[in-house]
Amino acid sequence: MYYLNINDDDFIKTVCKTAFPNYNGRKLKINYNCKQINLRSYWDGGSKSTYVILRLDDNKTLQAPVSHPFFNKSITGVDNFVIPENYVVVQHSIFCGKDMGLTIHTPSAAQLLNDGSDNIELTRVQKMVLCWIVGLKSAYRKQERINSHFPEKLYNIICKELESMELIKINKNGAVQNTLKARNLIQLGSQNNDGYAWWSQMYDWKTRSFSGEAKTILESYKTKYNLK
């Protein structure tokens, strides 16, 4: 599940406005790889979720009916609705009277790609750094990089490379922010992500140096950017 501002991406904004034209909020979540979903929609203690099924080809929509499990027993097919290919389900949630925003449920990250991220090829080390940036934020993120002995100079260089691909943004203070393009890209390739363990395993504590693929990567970047 990824959280973002509804105005972060024009294509996503169009999907949201087509499903819920009167929604003026900015809260948005994307639920990737959602194959089935419960579409039951009814008020219960000040809470309700409204669902709209949207076809991406032509933006045709169909709102799921009110389907209380006791008063609307005759309505079937909403408990385990299978989202077809090229469709998404947009959910508007109210919880205890508070607007919780929209959620886009999609069976495949590729369906939401309107940004060219499916054509981007990353090296293994670029992908590792991007996963650090896109992953869940915590105080331990930086510590992960330190524990794996990943050089800070190399990290900063790869961040610049990722910025040139429009996958991240670096502000004037040096803070790094990921983009929807980066999130989509990581979702598409998440099954091939082997994290940072492969890098840290090539560090020799005795010699305090790298071997194998890590050594080759370091040497290539030293040559390319004239690093010491």
Image (spheres, grey):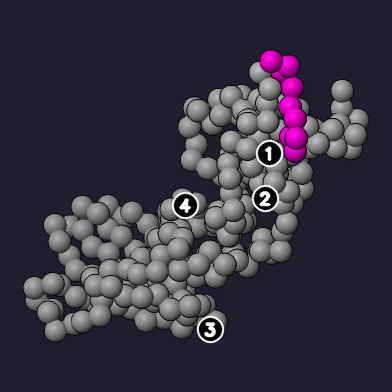
Q: Position of residue 224 (x, y in %)?
A: 89, 37
Instruction: Tell me how far mark 2 sits from mark 4, CA to CA.
Output: 15 Å
Is residue 220 in view? Answer: yes
Residue 51 on image: x %, y %: 33, 71
> Nearer the N terminus, badge 3 or badge 2?
3
Q: Residue at x 34, y 63 (%)?
A: 92
At label 1, which amino acid type do we have?
Ile
Residue identifier under label 3: 58
Could you classify mark 1 by the number of other residues whose Cα lies within 10 Å: few (under 14), some (14-19), or many (20 or more)? some
Return the residue at label 2.
167
Contact (CB < 8 A) between labels 3 and 4? Answer: no
Q: Which mark is residue 2?
A: 4
Q: Tell which of 57 and 203 is nearer to you.
A: 203
Separation of marks 1 and 4 at Cα, in angstroms: 20 Å
Q: Earlier in the sequence, mark 1 or mark 3?
A: 3
Cα separation between marks 3 and 4: 25 Å
| Residue 29 in the image: above or below residue 221 | below
In this view, the residue in front, 159 or 213, is 213
- Measured as percent of width and height from the top left, residue 102 is found at 39, 60
Q: Residues within 10 Å of mark 4 (few under 14, many from 20)?
A: some
Task: Judge whether 100 appears above or below 91 on screen.
Answer: above
Provide the residue designation for mark 1: 170
Q: Earlier in the sequence, mark 3 or mark 4?
A: 4
For the residues labelled 3 and 2, the Cα–Cα distance comes to: 28 Å
